[in-house]
Amino acid sequence: MKNNLIIILTLLPLWCGAQVKQTIAYTDYMAQVRNKNLVYAAEKLNIPIADADVQAAKVFNDPTLSFEYANNDDHKMQMGQGYSVELSKTFSPGKLRARTNLAQCEKELTAALLDDFFRHLRAEATVAYLEAIKQTHLFELKFNSYLSIYNLAKADSIKFTLGKITEVDALQSRLEAGVSYNEVLQAKSDLYHAYAALNLPLGQFHADTLYVPVGTLEMSNRTFSQSNLLSTALNHRSDLVAALKNVEVAQKALRLTRRERNVDFDIALGYNYNTEVRNELAPAPKFSGITLGMSIPLKFSNFNKGVVHSAQNKALQAQEQYQQAELEVQTEVMQNYNAYLSLCSQVERFKTGMLEKAETVIKGKIYSYNRGETSLLEVLDAQRTYNDVQALYIETLFNHASSLVSLEQSVGIWDLEI
């Protein structure tokens, strides 16, 4: 068997060229996904952006300093000159705090959205990792099937030489070996596609390296409490946290809208200095004065409450969206929970005799064929049945593991080990 394996590996085309296979454990893979994924790195920049927005929201109205000079025809009429300086500032009661509170709430929403983004990224990367493991098993299955038929074809060639079987039977076994070899090539292509896909979540591409996952599709069945799953999802799932935070943002935006309608007022403090008036008709000594004033706009525009009504409806809309999100989460959790239970049962059915029976049948058919007690067609039919059962088992294991990923993703927990 080892010699056959060496022969087949030599015959297989070098799909990967000079690529080096590098094994990577699941924990290491997920650590690199967290640290190197480019889209996640871009999303994380939203946090410092939100911090900057909070700082920008704290900007207050700048004071205004103005200077004025007056010359009352002093050169000809000697009416004197005047100098004045004024410091004024616009006050907006309640607006600064409302803007700051809104920006802070939006920052918390950004953090919740980032957590939810990673929740999806983590699940997608895990499924890609499981897909690579699945394709590895399928390739091994196709390869072992080919070895079995290849050895059968070699034996049939000897039998034909000895005159024990007809040329047609020997030709058919060689033909079946060729068909099986093509299936190996397709499985190899699918395998390397799965390996290459592992690079995308890592945010990198190495033309000379392929990452090979280390792990198994077999996961022990977990026991979950339906009520605990629902409670955990409603309390901790990141998209629900974001939806609830969005309600708060809408309420803060409504409060800011109302504060923006508050009347702004200006307070000004001025100092005036006038030089001596030397005009003979109306002489006056030099003097200075202080002015204090306030200006208040007449906010007739506040009679139009369209902006307020819009903000109120957005707040109601956010509340309705949160309730809808809760319903969707509960439905998703129950669907994934039921799917997981079903796949647990399917895996158990395979382990209660289906795999052993399929293996027993193919071994028995090959033994009988070598003794001349059964036909080649029966052997090939048993081989196909065995391959189908094994492939279905591998696919079921993959679906079982993926359903656990989906269940934990929908609940908002994560304790997977592969």
Image (spheres, rainbow, N blue to C red):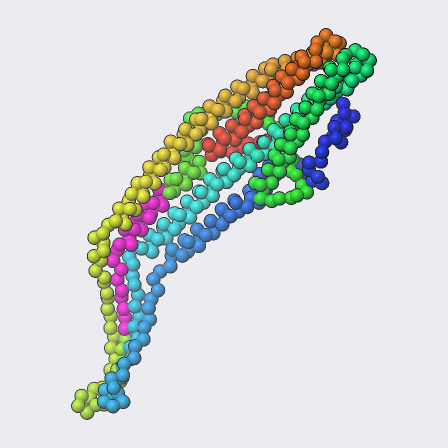
Q: What residue is drawn where x is 63% and y is 13%?
A: 357
Which quadrant does the C terminus fall into?
top right
Task: Judge whether residue 261 is colored magenta.
Answer: yes
Q: Is residue 186 above or below residue 28?
A: above
Q: Is residue 237 above or below residue 1?
A: below
Q: What residue is drawn where x is 39% and y is 49%?
A: 104
Residue 105 or residue 37, whichever sits in front: 37
Residue 72 or residue 3, whichever sits in front: 3
Residue 347 horizontal/vertical position (percent) = 56, 20
Which quadrant does the N terminus fall into?
top right
Task: Judge whether residue 304 is colored magenta.
Answer: no
Q: Which residues are magenta?
A: 247-270
Q: What residue is drawn where x is 24% and y is 70%?
A: 292
Q: Among all residues in the image, which is located at the extreme right?
A: 162
Residue 148 or residue 393, whichever sits in front: 148
Residue 369 quadrant: top right
Does any portion of residue 20 appear in the rendered image?
Answer: no
Q: Among all residues in the image, which is located at the extreme top?
A: 373
Residue 248 horizontal/vertical position (percent) = 35, 44
